[in-house]
Image (cartoon, rainbow, N blue to C red):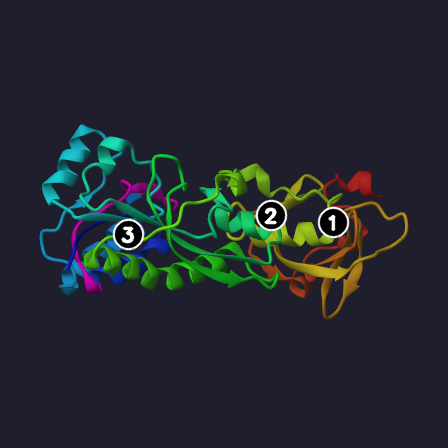
């Protein structure tokens, strides 16, 4: 049984924490500090910190095991890590980069779960990147941590086929669930002896950028397939949105309705309604059917309920002011 320091912060890291706790001894948890949340703005602990407290209460992690929440990895944080005397670090979505001084604290090194088939989609947003690119497959990689982000040798990989209906939310959830036993398997290998790993081909590397709120704005000149991918990739955050008469309209779900459209129709033009498919909108190439929509500050609605409360919607051109679309 190895002594493991687990590093992670969001909900997607919790399955890995739980799986490791059932097989190995977790001697410390490293996670982000509490952050303001909700309308009150009161600081709330990360999902990993809350899960660690629960696992301590359940006896799966020893009482007194430190939950470390430094704002940055400095000498003080490294001293706290060293005091736990871990053999290895296991990481998933911690949110900070580890330097050589920190990585040197682990006699067996450090491993990381990354939700893509490295070297494709290195970086902080691999799940949205795979959906945006309409990749046929993505996957899970357990890699040795290196100083260059996501460039470490690959220990285990598992492929996940994509069918074009995934959202970032459900794809990340799947990667979290299926990745948890893989990170335990990698730790098991370290316990047995030297671990074989395969170097990445850096020439094949692609990179995913950090998402920004403004990235979710829909460009109706894009193809219906690309807009559909954006809506799925940016669910739940930052969300896909457009405008109508100065109001912000969030689009939560849509699908490609047709590969053609109305000749000479302006991209963004609401063409009408298909009672089964949704609200039909012309794009730069093809027609998109909007299924679930939401005016900002109001509830998300299915397209039929939305139309009941929104008059003259079929007359609009989305992405423009009402007067421009008439």
- Find residue 252 and report its horizontal and vertical position in percent: 59, 55
Residue that badge 3 annotates: 48
Q: Is mark 3 on a helix, strand or loop?
A: helix
- Find residue 275 and report its horizontal and vertical position in percent: 75, 69
Please tell me how crowded label 2 is: few (under 14), some (14-19), or many (20+) other residues with Cα within 10 Å.
many
- Rendered image quadrant of residue 51: bottom left
Q: Which numbered disc flags the more N-terminal residue, 3 or 2?
A: 3
Q: Residue at x 66, y 59 (%)?
A: 254
Q: Real-space Cα distance between discs 3 and 2?
A: 28 Å
> Camera-side residue: 171 or 274?
171
Residue that badge 2 annotates: 240
Q: What element carries label 2?
A: strand
- Rendered image quadrant of residue 71: top left
Q: Real-space Cα distance between discs 1 and 3?
A: 39 Å
Question: Does residue 325 appear left or right of residue 298 in this picture?
Answer: right
Q: Check the picture and name the quadrant holding the N terminus.
A: bottom left
Comparing labels 2 and 1, the label whose residue is closer to the camera: 1
Is 299 part of what is drawn in magenta?
no
Mark number displayed over residue 223: 1
Please tell me how crowded label 3 is: few (under 14), some (14-19), or many (20+) other residues with Cα within 10 Å.
many
Q: Is mark 1 on a helix, strand or loop?
A: loop
The span picked out in magenta is 22-42
Q: Which numbered disc flags the more N-terminal residue, 2 or 1?
A: 1
């Amino acid at each position: 049984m190895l002594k493991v320091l687990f590093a992670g912060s969001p909900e997607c890291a919790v399955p890995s924490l739980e799986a490791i706790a059932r097989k190995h001894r977790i001697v410390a948890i490293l996670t982000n500090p509490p952050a303001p949340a909700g309308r009150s703005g009161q600081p709330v602990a990360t999902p990993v910190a809350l899960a660690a407290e629960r696992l301590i209460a359940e006896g799966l992690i020893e009482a007194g095991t430190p939950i470390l929440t430094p704002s940055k990895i400095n000498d003080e944080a490294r001293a706290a890590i060293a005091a736990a005397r871990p053999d290895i670090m296991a990481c998933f979505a911690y949110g900070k980069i580890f330097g050589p001084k920190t990585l040197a604290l682990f006699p067996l090194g450090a491993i990381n779960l990354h939700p893509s088939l490295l070297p494709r989609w290195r970086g902080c947003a691999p799940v949205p990147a795979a959906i945006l690119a309409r990749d046929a497959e993505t996957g899970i990689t357990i890699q040795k941590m290196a100083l260059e982000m996501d460039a470490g040798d690959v220990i285990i990989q598992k492929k996940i086929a994509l069918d074009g209906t995934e959202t970032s939310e459900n794809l990340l959830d799947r990667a979290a669930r299926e990745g948890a036993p893989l990170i335990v398997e990698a730790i098991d290998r370290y316990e047995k002896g030297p671990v074989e790993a395969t170097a990445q081909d850096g020439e094949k590397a692609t990179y995913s950028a950090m998402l920004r709120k403004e990235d979710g704005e829909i460009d109706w000149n894009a193809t219906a397939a690309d807009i559909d991918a954006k809506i799925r990739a940016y669910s739940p955050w930052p969300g896909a949105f457009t405008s109508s008469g100065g109001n912000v309209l969030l689009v939560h779900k849509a699908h490609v309705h047709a590969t053609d459209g109305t000749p000479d129709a302006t991209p963004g033009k609401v063409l009408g309604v298909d009672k089964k498919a949704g609200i039909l909108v012309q794009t730069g190439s093809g027609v998109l059917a909007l299924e679930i929509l939401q005016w900002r500050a109001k509830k998300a609605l299915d397209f039929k309920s939305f139309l009941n409360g929104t008059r003259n919607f079929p007359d609009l051109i989305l992405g423009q002011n009402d007067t421009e679309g008439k």
